[in-house]
Image: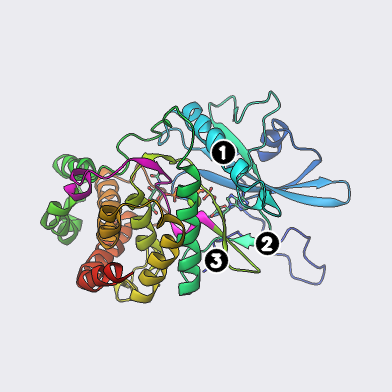
């Protein structure tokens, strides 16, 4: 399925079509926010865009003479990202570095996010309510996918994320800021689950007994990558399938987006999250767990695609952990959904009752599916 609003039409509907109900009012006045950025033209419309669990993303349409242009506006969730200024400094450095790397390509602006400066020349605007906003040029003729549709897409996505890591390997010092400290420190994520379980503030532990048991039974895997002595790199850390734009015409992965968590990390955090989000044919919150499974051909395409770009810098140890990283990161995100369910849904946006528990269940089902195929996955990686 395509990300909800990724292909929103901007033209007015033909007069003959029955009028659809007015969309609910937006939480923020995008017309006012738009004025704070160096964008010409008149505000036409704004609509929510994408399927984020954290930030608020909008597509804003502007009239510029005879043309209408789209922009992406985002409100940074500053409860989750508690140092937004440092975060924007990271994004500015990273996008400028990437822009130099892709400058030789035709249409370079489709291969890297381009920040639009605020009226006073900053990379963000802080509104009177304390919200932090940023704006990007809209990348046309490409889209993101919430659920994988083909192994070609898996190959293209992994190739693009590998290229992203490769292009950032020579990012000049200083070290990037940690926008969320210990983001992928799985043992600390496990400890957070134990704390939420002890506190049980929402009295929900009784509703999640099998999931809690699954988490406790699998604790042993939590510390494996932390102890493995792998090299720190500049990584994306949120390589969901829907964080890479695939070109409509060529299906190539043209631009890695959602850069809030770009910071020092392990290459395997990124590969692991690709396995989590690009091998199962089901949505992350699918309630029918029989739909959730790791499809081997998708895994193979991820490995092959990733190695075309990351193969030249990965160490043998990193390669060896590729299959395991998928299981670990899926387990870790499952732990986080379960923790948030127990804590009363304070971190991830939820849209229905037990939403975080449903999400946790798909993750743990996927962990089981990966575990059942791990030997075969390891054999594949050894032969490539
Ligand atoms: P989040 O997931 O935090 O809301 P993203 O940065 O991933 O934010 O953006 C949400 C969605 O908006 C993406 O999945 C993508 O479809 C779309 N999107 C983001 N940036 C752009 C862009 N510059 N051009 C076109 N579409 C974009
Ligand atoms: C969040 O914002 P979004 O949807 O890209 C989360 C990721 C999780 C993901 C699970 C900052 O990502 O870590 O893997 O949800 N981002 C943050 O779908 O916590
Ligand atoms: Mg995203």
Q: Which of marks 3 and 2 precedes in the sequence?
A: 3
Residue matched to label 1: 97
Residue 251: percent from left, percent from top:
58, 68
Disc 2 from disc 3: Cα separation: 13 Å
Badge 3 vs badge 1, beta-carbon distance below 8 Å: no
Which image quarter is the C terminus in? Answer: bottom left
Q: Quadrant of residue 11?
A: bottom right
- Judging from the image, what secondary structure is the residue with disc 1 in? helix
Q: Is residue 45 above or below residue 291?
A: above
Residue at figure coordinates x 88%, y 46% from the top left:
65
Task: Residue 227: say if magenta.
Answer: yes
**Is ligand 1 less than 8 Å from the beta carbon at label 1?**
no
Q: Nearer the viewer, residue 299 or 20?
A: 299
Instruction: Look at the numbered discs 1 and 2 and tell me whether their residues touch, using CB distance below 8 Å.
Output: no
- Estimate how packed mark 2 is, as few (under 14), some (14 to 19) or many (20 or more) residues with alpha carbons within 10 Å: few
Q: Residue at x 48, y 30 (%)?
A: 84
Mark 3 Cα-neighbour bin, 10 Å: few <14, some 14–19, many ≥20 = some
x, y percent for residue 275: 35, 62
Rendered residue at 45%/29% (across/down): 173
- Identify whether 115 is placed above or below 348: above
Q: Does label 1 or label 2 sit earlier along the sequence?
A: 1
| Residue 348 point in image, percent of width and height | 38, 47
For label 2, the residue is 141
Q: Nearer the viewer, residue 233 or 65?
A: 233
CA separation in Å, label 3 and label 1: 30 Å
Q: Is mark 2 within 8 Å of ligand 1?
A: no
The magenta stretch is 223-244
Specify whether residue 159 is painted magenta.
Answer: no
The image quadrant of residue 101 is top right
Q: Residue at x 18, y 41 (%)?
A: 191
**Closer mark to the observer between disc 2 and disc 3:** 2
């Amino acid at each position: 399925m395509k990300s909800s609003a990724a292909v929103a039409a901007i033209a007015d509907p033909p007069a003959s079509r029955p009028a659809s109900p007015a969309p609910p009012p937006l939480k923020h006045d995008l017309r006012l926010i738009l004025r704070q950025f160096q964008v010409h033209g008149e505000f036409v419309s704004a609509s929510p865009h994408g399927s984020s669990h954290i930030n608020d993303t909008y597509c804003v349409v502007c009239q510029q003479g005879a043309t209408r242009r789209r922009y992406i506006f985002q409100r940074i969730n500053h409860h989750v990202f508690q140092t937004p200024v440092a975060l924007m400094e990271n994004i500015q450095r990273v996008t400028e570095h990437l822009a130099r790397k892709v400058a030789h390509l035709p249409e370079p602006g489709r291969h890297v996010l381009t920040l639009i400066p605020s009226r006073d020349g900053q990379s963000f605007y802080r509104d009177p309510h304390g919200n932090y906003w940023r704006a990007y040029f809209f990348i046309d003729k490409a889209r993101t996918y919430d659920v994988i549709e083909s192994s070609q897409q898996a190959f293209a996505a992994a190739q693009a994320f590998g290229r992203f890591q490769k292009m950032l390997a020579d990012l000049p010092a200083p070290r990037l800021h940690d926008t969320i400290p210990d983001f992928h420190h799985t043992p600390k994520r496990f400890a957070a689950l134990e704390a939420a379980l002890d506190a049980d503030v929402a009295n929900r532990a009784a509703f999640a007994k099998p999931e809690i048991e699954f988490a406790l039974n699998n604790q042993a895997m939590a510390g494996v990558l932390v102890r493995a002595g792998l090299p720190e790199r500049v990584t994306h850390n949120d390589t969901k399938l829907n964080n890479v734009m695939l070109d409509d015409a060529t299906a190539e992965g043209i631009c890695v987006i959602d850069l809030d968590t770009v910071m020092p990390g392990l290459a395997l955090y990124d590969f692991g999250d690709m396995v989590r989000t690009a091998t199962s044919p089901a949505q992350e919150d699918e309630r029918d767990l029989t739909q959730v499974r790791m499809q081997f051909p998708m895994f193979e395409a991820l490995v092959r695609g990733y190695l075309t770009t990351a193969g030249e810098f990965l160490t043998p140890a990193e390669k060896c952990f590729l299959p395991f990283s998928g299981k670990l990161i899926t387990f870790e995100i499952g732990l986080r959904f379960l923790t948030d369910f127990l804590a009363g849904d304070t971190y991830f946006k939820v849209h229905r009752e037990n939403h975080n528990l449903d999400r946790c269940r798909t993750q743990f089902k996927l962990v089981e599916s990966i575990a059942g195929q791990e030997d075969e996955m390891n054999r594949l990686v050894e032969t490539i």
